[in-house]
Image (cartoon, helix red, strand yellow):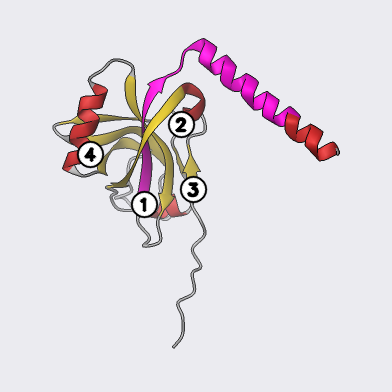
Amino acid sequence: MAEKKNKTKSINIKNKRASFDFLLLDKYTAGIVLTGTEIKSIRAGKASLVDTFCFIHNGEVWVKNMYVAEYSYGSYNNHAARRDRKLLLNRKEIRKLQQEMKSPGFTLVPTLLFIDENGRAKVDVYLCRGKKEYDKRQTLKEKEDRREIDRQVKRY
């Protein structure tokens, strides 16, 4: 019995800015509805989550402003690079998110776009609260302190 070789490389497209701008609270993993050549572009790593956010409309979760580059070998029915894409979550999760987002300051932010072991595109979405300026300064200070400690440990 010949085993199937796993030649797929790991695709992890991250939104690095999200953890700096937001306090990440609850994590949800959602499927994403793609059309045509979008999955081929994502598998090629040509996507970006910069300046993306999620919203709930008519009981459905949508991701707005996600960039997926046009597929280079696509024909006339190539996809639009920036369009609203539907996220697939359970109804129970969507209702919970709607309740949480009613309070001011909360938002949904996609942080990671990846391909799972079955070859499907998935998005990690966090329920977040925006950080104040002093919180951001504190985060930078902690990051710099960790770097300094690592440098000291490395010397000895």
Which is nearer the N-term, disc 4 or disc 1? 4
- Checking the image for residue 121, the label placed there is 1
> Residue at 40% across / 37% down in the picture?
67
Which is nearer the N-term, disc 3 or disc 1? 3
Label 4 SS: helix
Q: How far apart are marks 3 and 1 (CA)?
A: 10 Å
The single residue placed furthest to the bottom in the displayed view is 1
Residues drawn in magenta: 122-148
Label 1 SS: strand
Residue 22 at x, y percent in the picture: 44, 24
Residue 143 at x, y percent in the picture: 64, 26
Left or right: 35 with respect to 45?
left
Residue 87 at x, y percent in the picture: 27, 42
Q: How far apart are marks 4 and 1 (CA)?
A: 19 Å
Circle 3 residue:
12
Residue 6 at x, y percent in the picture: 49, 69
Disc 3 to disc 2: CB gap under 8 Å:
no
User: Looking at the rendering, which quadrant does residue 47 occupy?
Assistant: top left
Above or below: residue 119 compared with residue 64: below
